[in-house]
Image (cartoon, helix red, strand yellow):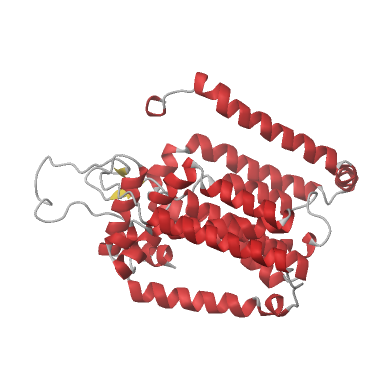
Amino acid sequence: AGVTLAMLDAFSLLPVVLLTVALTAGLWWATRTARAAVATPAGRATSWVRMAAVVAALTATVVNGALPGEHMQTGRDGGTYTATAGWIATDGGLVIDAARPPFDDTDGLGYFAAGFHEIVPDGPLYAQFMHAFPAMMATVDRAGGLDLMVRTNALLGGLALLALYAFAERLIRPWLALLTQTALAVTLVFVYFTRAPFSELLMLGLLFAGLWALDQAVARRDRATGFVAGLLLGGAFLARLDGLVVLLMLVLALLPPVVTGRLRRVAPAALAGIATISAVAAIDLFVFAPFYVALHVEFLVPLALGFVAVAAIAAAARSGPGRTAVVAVLRHRRRIATAVALLIVVAAVFAYVVRPVVQIDTWNR
């Protein structure tokens, strides 16, 4: 809600709250059938584990929220996010008009800061990232001030831990899901991102919340819940540009020849949800972060080709030879999944061990 209003240069606390309430009420009503379904009661042991998961998330929120990093200097991403959030909260829009009195009529004066760039000389400044996260920070700023704004990620981190546990419990035993949640909560990366303004945790929470909602939609055969799941999953792209990598894999999983079984029923609704939020994210990216696009052309072009390839594969799967290939893929899906998993492990080892030796300095590429 916040980022959409900021795109319209109409961001302020009351409209954000009203729009958020309206959207939440609409989604709550749309998923009434799935929520009315009778769920299997949890055993006593599972209930205790769930309580422990809630306590772990609350503990992480309180502890990390007590030690926030303000990052007021715009030397790196944290400071840039904070400065952008402050601008949105004050000005109500995403485009930064730096030439303001008393500096607007000074000859030879330029405006520049790390993370902010102009497209034309003496033009407005654009932040070099997506704006959903700073818009959320700006909402907290308007509601509770700077002290609470710099603690936004502590709350987002706690919610992300709950979403992770909820989805993990659908795949593994509850105590293993709790162990997974706790292991993430104590890692240096999670602690650092929770205490500083970075958008990774927003993406993490939206991703696992979306996967959990998609699982619920499949279990209850409910297309409305599938659409909500798509909205959450599409939020990964709205939160971060590299969320497109996740979306590519999700779209591949939701289209032929990969999609099968009960997932096939809710897949179109999930794809519609993803497309809806992705359209908002695309406007944010190409209209309000043009320098960010120019900076990551080498990343965006292969991804765009990947989406084209996925669409072509899905279209080909409807032909005669394509249906034959689909049958072959489904027959060997376990072997294919194992090979893909091994490939991911190899890529992770390469990224951790080999790439630091051969990488190019980010600022000299």
- Left of 162 or right of it: where is 105? left
- Left of 104 or right of it: where is 91? right
Residue pictured at 21% horizontal, 51% vertical? 98
Q: Nearer the viewer, residue 234 or 61?
A: 61
Q: Nearer the viewer, residue 351 or 119?
A: 351
Disc count in the image? 0
Residue 218 image offset from top left, x and y in percent: 75, 64
Q: Nearer the viewer, residue 133 or 112?
A: 133
Residue 107 image offset from top left, x and y in percent: 9, 43
Residue 222 seen anywhere in this rendered image of the structure? yes
Residue 214 image offset from top left, x and y in percent: 69, 62
Q: Nearer the viewer, residue 186 or 105?
A: 186
Q: Quadrant of the image for the C terminus?
A: top left
Compared with residue 289, is residue 363 higher up or lower down, i.e. above or below?
above
Name the residue at the top extreme.
357
Residue 335 image offset from top left, x and y in percent: 84, 38
**On the image, which quarter does residue 4 sit in?**
bottom left
- Left of 20 or right of it: where is 36? right
**On the image, which quarter does residue 29 sit in?**
bottom right
